[in-house]
Each structure stands twice: as structure tokens, then as C-alpha cells.
Amino acid sequence: MTPSPSLTGTIHIVGAGLAGLAAAVRMAQSGRRVVLYESAGQAGGRCRSYHDTALDRRIDNGNHLLFSGNHAAMGYLQAIGAADSLDGPERAEFPFLDLASGESWTVRLDRGRVQWGLLSAQRRIPGTTVLDYLGGIKFLLAGASKTVAECFDTARPMYRRFWEPLAVAALNTRGDEGAARLLWPVLRDTFGKGEAASRPRYVRNGLSESFIDPALRLLEDQHSKVHFNSRLKSISFQGRAVSGLDFGDGVTPFAADDVAILALPPWIVSDLMPDIKVPGETRAIVNGHFLLPHSISDWAPMGLIGGTAQWLFARGDVASVTVSAADDLVNEAAETIAEKIWPEITRALNLGDTQLGRYRIVKEKRATFAQTPDQVARRPDTHTGYKNLFLAGDWTNTGLPATIEGAIRSGNSAADAARRLVPTG
């Protein structure tokens, strides 16, 4: 719907990453006046696509695997008209390759919630038993201080070949550090709801084409304003309410029923508002993109065990890998990283002795907050204690790991809180 003059109050959203875009879309579609500010020259934050000069290909800044049961992400794509922009298999299947042993297997879920197929050893991960698969309940029972590794016998194959890769991918934190209880909602909303909610989903063309560009078009259609290259310098207050925002060209004053949503990284929020407790530690992610000698079709993301690369994606003639919890690797030279990863790609894709060609290594030193028990305890709620100021971001207290699903859910929560505050005429 087009904003109506009868709806009063402007929603000022600072930050055009996924959390900010989700909040903006939700507010604009409810008829509110939205102004979106972004310090960079483009939207998307860490979730975007661009043309890379080294590869002469369009690539994503990072690789993201979603599940069909990620309802916030799927709802967002539906809202912006991009629900058909994802690919994925018709069944929940997850191929793995152990680079150390050479063993490969595929985790396949039965339709329905009861996984009768696990009674067959051929359907299980090599070296595991039926009882190993009941371990997910430990995340539900885990206390706030418990790490993933403390929930399991780390010497068992099930930990090395499933629980640890799941934890590192979801938490971007090593298993011996990662907060165990954050993984329960991940399992509950996907595997816990059966095969239909567990199907892997990934972008067909690019992150921008799926998550960013359609949202910007919707905001334009709704007559929302988007200001790029606008970095928030300071916030003015009057009592317990925001009275203005300063982007370096003077303070933008607030009307009585204006609202601000900060969808910014935690360290920036901390600089702007030192009284708000935020997670202070971060973890790195390294992504590598490699030009292949030919295009790959019908390729599902593959989990890699026992090497440097952890997940392998392929789109066209570009193979992309992700290394999470990469705080040691991120300090190595790009050439060194590429030389470590390329042999793993050639094994997974059966490329023989194909030599390393053009590549791009992308380092995100502060990709997510460190999802350790002590840092999780520092996640703030959407409500800040200031009447007209709300927070959004995957690092806020969503109850989920810092993922696309968490970012969108946080934006929705901030928008809902703001919508309740802003009068409707």
C-alpha cells in the first residue's frame, strides 16, 4: 500500500543490511513513512553481490545456506516478490566428504518427523549409531554457560562429522567455545519439524538479486527514501526519547511521533550509545571464490570435513568455499589460503590435477559476534529503554544464531515494536 497522509510519524532506519531492510519493508508495507540511511554506497552489508575484477564474474560477498523452515527469511522473500529466486533439492539432502579419510556420505531425511531410515547403518553417517542422533535434545537442556563440545563425546564420529560442522557453520564459533543452547531453535525449526522444513535453499543468481535489489525496488514503489553514504555521527536525546539524528550535515530533528531503528553493527551502537550493553568480541569468516575450467550444473552445497574449507558451493564456472570461525586463517596471505583450499576443491569436484587459476579470497574479520556463552549474555533486546529507539541486527537478542534468519527476524521485531508506538491517525 502507498503511505497515507493519515499515518503520522516517520520511521528513521539506520543501516541497510538485511536487518534494516527487513524493518524498512515491514514498515513501508504497513503504510508508514520510512527513511533509510546507509553509510556505504550500496545496501546489503555482508549480504550482497558484486562484479569481481579478478574473476571477471559476479560473485556473492559470502556464501549462505538457508533451510525451507527459515520462516522469517522465506516470508521476507515473499514480501519483496523474490520467493522464486532460490534453488534447492526437492528433498532434504546434505552431501559430505571427509577429506582426511576419503569417505563420502549424504544425510537424507525421511518425509515426516520420525526418521525410520536411521535404523539402517547404510543411511547413517559412517561410524555413528542410532543413539547418536538423539543428541540434539542436549541443546534444549543445555544451560546458559554450556558449550557445544561440553554436550558431547568429542571423540565420537558423530561429533566430528555432524555436530561440530553444524555448530561452526551456525555459530561461526568453534565447538569448544560456541553456546550450545543457540543451536536448539535451529534444530527445532528445521530437522525437528521434519523433511519439509529441512530442505537446503540457496540463491539462484546472487544475494543481491534475491535479498537486496527487490527490497529496494519495493521501498521505491512505496515512496520510501533511501540515503546512501550517510554515516550516523551522533544521536540527540530529550529525556528518554530520541530528538534528532546527526549525519554530519546538521541534526535531523524528530517530530513527537518519529521513531529510530538502529540496524548497525554492535561496535558502532556501542560508540553511539555507551550505556547499551552489546557483545564486544567478534569472529572471522573467510570465503574463497575460484574460477573453474568448466561450468558445474546441478550441484548441491557440500560439507567438507577434515580440511581447511568447510562448505563448498558451485554456481556456473565458479566454486566458492566458506571457512567459519576463521580467526587464525584470516591473518594468512590470500595466496597461501588459495593454495590450501584449491586441492580440496579439486578432490570434491573430481577435477584431477587441474592447476589453480584465478581466484578471489574475501576476508571478513568481524563477520559476526563471538557466539560464546558470555557474549550471548550481552545481546540486547529490541527495546532500548528509550521510548522511540529500537535495535535490529543478528547480534541482538533474537534467540537465534547470527544468521540471515536471525537478522530478518530482528528487523521484523524492531518494526513491530515501532509500529505499535507510531499512531495510525
Image: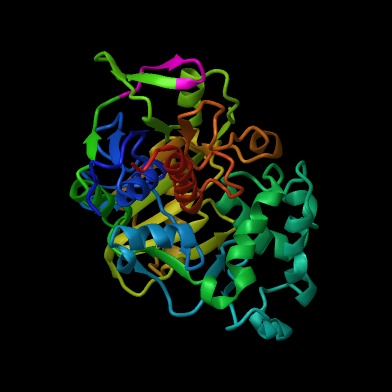
Question: In the image, which residues are magenta?
Answer: 231-241
The residue depicted at 60 percent of the width and 26 percent of the height is 277
Q: Is residue 172 left or right of residue 4?
A: right
* Whether residue 330 is situated above or below residue 301 in the rendered picture: above
Q: Identify the image quadrant of the C terminus.
A: top left
Number of numbered callouts drawn: 0
* Residue 336, quarter of picture: top left
Magenta region includes residue 145? no
Q: Which residue is at a point 30% across and 65% down the rendered structure image?
A: 85
Q: Residue 237 lies in magenta, yes or no?
A: yes
Q: Nearer the viewer, residue 7 or 418?
A: 7
In the picture, measured across the screen, residue 380 lies left or right of residue 44, that is right
Which residue is painted at 28% across and 31% down in the image? 40
In percent of width and height, residue 228 lies at 24, 32
Q: Is residue 354 visible?
A: no
Colour scheme in use: rainbow
**Residue 127 x/y as whole percent:** 73, 72
Q: Residue 221: where, in percent of width, then height?
A: 19, 50
